[in-house]
Image (cartoon, coloured by chain):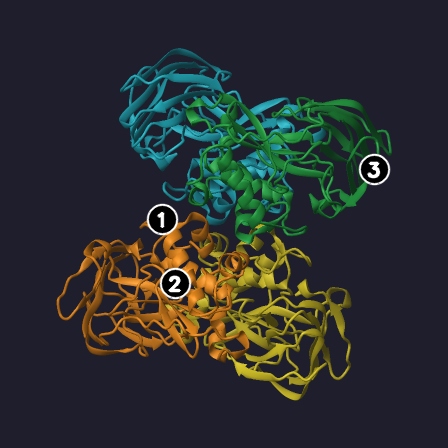
Chain colours: A orange, B green, C cyan, D yellow
Amino acid sequence: MHIRVGCEFSYEATWPTPTVLLVQPHPLGEHTIVREEWQLTSQIAMHAYHDIYGNLCQRLLLPQGDHMLRYDATIEVADTWDDVSPAAPQLPVEDLPDDVLLYTLPSRFCLSDVLSDTAWALFGTTEPGWARVQAICDWVHEHIRFQYGTSMSQTTAVDIYVQRVGVCRDLTHLAVTFCRALNIPTRYVFGYLPDIGVPISEAPMDFCAWMEVYLGDRWWTFDPRNNTPRVGRVLIGRGRDALDVAMVTSYGSPTLRQMIVWADEALAEQGKTITPMES
Amino acid sequence: MHIRVGCEFSYEATWPTPTVLLVQPHPLGEHTIVREEWQLTSQIAMHAYHDIYGNLCQRLLLPQGDHMLRYDATIEVADTWDDVSPAAPQLPVEDLPDDVLLYTLPSRFCLSDVLSDTAWALFGTTEPGWARVQAICDWVHEHIRFQYGTSMSQTTAVDIYVQRVGVCRDLTHLAVTFCRALNIPTRYVFGYLPDIGVPISEAPMDFCAWMEVYLGDRWWTFDPRNNTPRVGRVLIGRGRDALDVAMVTSYGSPTLRQMIVWADEALAEQGKTITPMES
Amino acid sequence: MHIRVGCEFSYEATWPTPTVLLVQPHPLGEHTIVREEWQLTSQIAMHAYHDIYGNLCQRLLLPQGDHMLRYDATIEVADTWDDVSPAAPQLPVEDLPDDVLLYTLPSRFCLSDVLSDTAWALFGTTEPGWARVQAICDWVHEHIRFQYGTSMSQTTAVDIYVQRVGVCRDLTHLAVTFCRALNIPTRYVFGYLPDIGVPISEAPMDFCAWMEVYLGDRWWTFDPRNNTPRVGRVLIGRGRDALDVAMVTSYGSPTLRQMIVWADEALAEQGKTITPMES
Amino acid sequence: MHIRVGCEFSYEATWPTPTVLLVQPHPLGEHTIVREEWQLTSQIAMHAYHDIYGNLCQRLLLPQGDHMLRYDATIEVADTWDDVSPAAPQLPVEDLPDDVLLYTLPSRFCLSDVLSDTAWALFGTTEPGWARVQAICDWVHEHIRFQYGTSMSQTTAVDIYVQRVGVCRDLTHLAVTFCRALNIPTRYVFGYLPDIGVPISEAPMDFCAWMEVYLGDRWWTFDPRNNTPRVGRVLIGRGRDALDVAMVTSYGSPTLRQMIVWADEALAEQGKTITPMES
């Protein structure tokens, strides 16, 4: 199955601005890059590196003035829906692999220390493992209203729990936070998500945040914003929270004029225009 | 029915400290002062005044050094339990008396603006009026664990909602906050509360915070910390939250060595020693 | 000197909405109402009352649909600039009148308890009294950038101190907070402020928040946003902070389509259109 | 130069508790381990691993009951004081190595996004590079009072900036935050710190938090708590903030009865007893 993904940013920078882009599929994701292409309005040197989580980042010095950056690719993914495995067990902490322990700790936006008692009160009586994670996703999906423009760059999971409204970044932060508070390793992930099999009216986005939870001997995809299995996810980045996997990190304040993201089956190209805050 | 109430503070002040005490029964409370007496270790001039809420405050300049202040009184109260009136209706905001509107607004510790969506999510489907207020008290009583030492002087109702533990001040703040978020006028109150009819093991306190809610044409007592009708309450102060009705307000940092508060039926005098934070 | 003041709100309400307006000059302000007039698009019953601070409020039930409310008045004020009295002394707390003690306490947005150590660190070595208050106004005026759209309805003085940007409401909250932390009684006030004697380019607003500070035996006007004496202020409301003197308090969520406020010398009528957040 | 370092924890656990210890010198630190020894009251299996930052952690399952864990080592370090290099330049972001970019981002306790404008206001006019970092350390050292018991496990750098008091963890968090807000890569570090050359009265601690700042082509030690070069530091852990380098991370709530840490020149063994919160 082929997914065409990509994004286009139009910027105005008042001076040269160091920038990191995280928009390419993750090197270790379960997909194959069939074709990919960068396009920039001017000659800009880009430099690729892998961050501490293994994400593929591009560094560049955004030149002064109006500029456009565009990434376009065709990705082959399996024609299968998110795995569902209700029998996947929750490991006791002492049996977790060393390298997943990091994902039981709080982070900038996922204040699992603050929400610890709340998490135990809400989910402490659910069956540990898959059922507990699903209960968390159900709760977040049902109780946190999805609405654009209701959160800001500094909004934490605690804010979301209190205000009960947010965007997919926020719903994911809160679910990640509850899982970690219950000692379930959980990482925040971010990727392209085509609207395959979804009624048009409910599918305004072509990229999304979701999460991966460690149960049994592997990571599993959960998506508290959509809360239903999907097909065609193309993973971009993994980290502790949205801070670690920002699509664009700018050292300065260039003005983002427009951002377009696409993710569609086969080769059909259908860009959608969104505002910067809408992820 | 006679209740003997009072309190004793032992302080050490490194310099003369302006202080306001709020420990005498409220001038408009439903009680009669049979006898009252102040006792101070040294000659200290006290000056009485009524604050903006009608509470009876005493101003004094606490002298340098170690000092003790003691208030002791015998109060006559009706031998009846807190009124319960499930039929008391919730007035639409437009029908509320002018002077109760103040108690629909947020205040320093009762951030009803922040918890507005939470309040509607938790209680929006309950029947307006008495049942809704009772549902709020039940929720707070069941979900917020009572434990000494779990909150600080700056702890707000939002903190309590998130941490799910607090003292009677905190439980009351949260219930007040939910009521106001639902447009039900609610004031924070504070008084002496004898342990009449309460198993000894559950009755460590002789003073307590509770709240008054405006339903129908009057204010009604609700007590989310105890959540059961009581007899013998002696109201001291009313206000928007604990800030307005502090037992002691010091302009400086005298060291509180010991505070004893008593409230007992008839003339039996049984002081109980508590630490300053235990209200 | 005659000042023409007033305001016009255009609303759309999806259902009848209880509303309180605070737009008329304060009954105890140093001004005389020469003429005043209310105008509403439909027959709406209004009911006046004085709140706990003595402000003149109007209650009404905003009808469903699109509506306009307009208040227009001609006010006579003294042709003098804000009093300046550097010799006005700061009273020790024990000498303050009873009824000003309220204004030494923290409030919803003026968290003088949280910023206590900061206030003493920044201003503890200044000369008590007028000089200390002026030092606070200077600091706020110089260090907090004025910019529309940088704060929200729940933004506190602590947020402003940290983010160093805000609108006149926020600058005033921070200055009020510092004063109270230093035991100087300070109330938040709100009124019409004509641009008399001010370069046009620096005078976009016709209403403003400022503060009153108790020194010697009276309240004095300080304006940390403008930080220079002005002429023609028409006081509307006084309170502990912006929460107590909101121009419009709605029990519901009507959509504010447009708000115009004017304040101009003599009878010249020059309305200015502003967005709702720009106060 | 030989430093004897170590620590001893006495715990009571009500059930077996998964625990991670981070007390051994960092594998890449500039020191040599001459001798090291673990001692435990009962047979407990320990498992070593390196976390994402390269720190050497020990995992164990703390058994139920009262237990003691003790680590003791002799470490050889250079007999030199912290390097001082005022000429070390601040690199433009575009010239920073890929792997240090992580340390320009906010983290759980170092909210450099929130304090960005404050950092620029306070330090934006200082000379970039060593002088700027030193100005930050000086400011923190002078303006944040050091006092035990003034912060909690969830206290952030913003809280510290506002309350102006904290412990070495907090002072370091605030300095790290300011550096990052100014695009200077900074990591939080933690280690043993003997009191060599320090007047006894000012040297109560044998472990401490400090920070490493990337200037020129390497990391440099800065210590805002002590703010003077020291000799004999034995680095334990590096990370984004205290969360990443906790001495003890417990998945459960064992009661810490006592913690002793030592760090002394040569072989003299002088343990000091401290309470858990005193780091």
Position of residue D55 in the picture relative to residue C263 (left or right): right
Q: List the residue tagged with mark 2.
A: A242
* Front residue of C211 and C230: C211
Residue visible at 45% across and 61% down?
Answer: D182
Q: List the residue tagged with mark 1.
A: A150
Position of residue A71 in the picture relative to residue D68 (left or right): left
* Front residue of A96 and A153: A96
Q: Could you say where residue C212 lies in the image, as x and y percent from the top left?
A: 54, 28
Q: Could you say where residue A119 lies in the image, as x and y percent from the top left?
A: 50, 59
Separation of marks 1 and 2 at Cα, in angstroms? 16 Å
Separation of marks 2 and 3 at Cα, in angstroms? 56 Å
Between discs 1 and 2, the one toward the N terminus = 1
Q: Is residue C278 above or below residue A247?
A: above
The amino acid sitting under disc 1 is Thr
The amino acid sitting under disc 2 is Ala
Disc 1 chain ID: A
* Front residue of A52 and B134: B134
The amino acid sitting under disc 3 is Met
Q: List the residue tagged with mark 3.
A: B68
